[in-house]
Amino acid sequence: MTGLYLHPLRLKALSEGRLSVLRVPVTKQTSRVTSCPWEYLGWKMVWIDPGLGDGPYLKVSAKDGETVHRVYPRMGDGDYFVKEAWCCEVDPLTSKPTGKILYKADGQEVMLDDGDGSWAENKDGTFASPWSSPMHMEEEDARYIVTLGDPVPVRLGEVDVSAMQQEGTFASLMQDPCDMAKQIKDKYRDEWNTIYPRHPWSPDLWTWAYSATWRKKTC
């Protein structure tokens, strides 16, 4: 099974049951074009083609303006295990692994023992982190499985408040209901820019939207 990295903001929404849509920007990393290098795409003319069994996908004009190319999502529908920051629990008395996996998203403080009962330090004197990168997580250490549906191409400017809530963005319960939609839109934009700083929010930015069903993995 293929692993899928989630930003901590989306991981928190998942753990709280607020994530039913996963949206990613249309980029070279999340998409594929079959008839030319990615760099040849011009993006001046873009439209959705429903396709015949292989869509929907995007049709994008090349920089020369003379040709049009198909852009498909790189991720297909199916099951993925969720990658997140993790570490092995260590018995403080024996300094040996207990066999239990701990997850950074749960917010617990974990000490990286230097072998003498003290917090291990980096060369610059800062405390060393016990957490392993999500990129190094293997399927057997994951706790969540996500089933993604067929992706749909959508411009960010077309995402409504309901869809933003399906991605985990919510308003304060103390918020004036008249201002709730505006708060969600503003918060969604801030969260998008935090999650995808290289692809900041723009109404013209194309995205792939996947329906997402989550479950905890069983041993």
Image (spheres, rainbow, N blue to C red):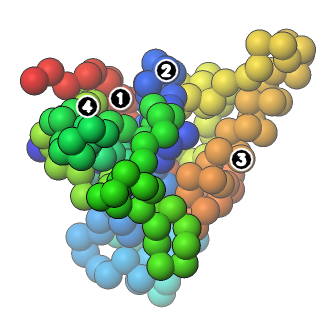
Q: Which of marks 1 and 3 precedes in the sequence?
A: 3
65 relative position to 44: left or right: left
Q: Tell me the crowding category of disc 2: few under 14, some 14 to 19, or many 20 or more residues within 10 angstroms, Cα based.
A: few
Where residue 173 appears, as percent x and y from the top left, is: 77, 13
Snapshot quadrant of residue 186: top right
Which residue is label 3 attached to?
A: 190
- Mark 2 and mark 1 in contact? Answer it, CB < 8 Å: no
Helix or strand or loop: what does disc 3 sit on?
Answer: helix
- Mark 3 and mark 1 in contact? Answer it, CB < 8 Å: no
Q: CA distance from mark 4 to mark 2?
A: 14 Å
Which residue is label 2 attached to?
A: 16
Residue at 65%, 45% (x, y): give it: 191
User: Identity of the amino acid at label 2?
Assistant: Glu
Helix or strand or loop: what does disc 1 sit on?
Answer: strand
Quarter holding the C terminus? top left
Residue at 84%, 13% (x, y): give it: 174
User: Identity of the amino acid at label 1?
Assistant: Ala
Helix or strand or loop: what does disc 2 sit on?
Answer: loop
Q: Tell me the crowding category of disc 1: few under 14, some 14 to 19, or many 20 or more residues within 10 angstroms, Cα based.
A: many
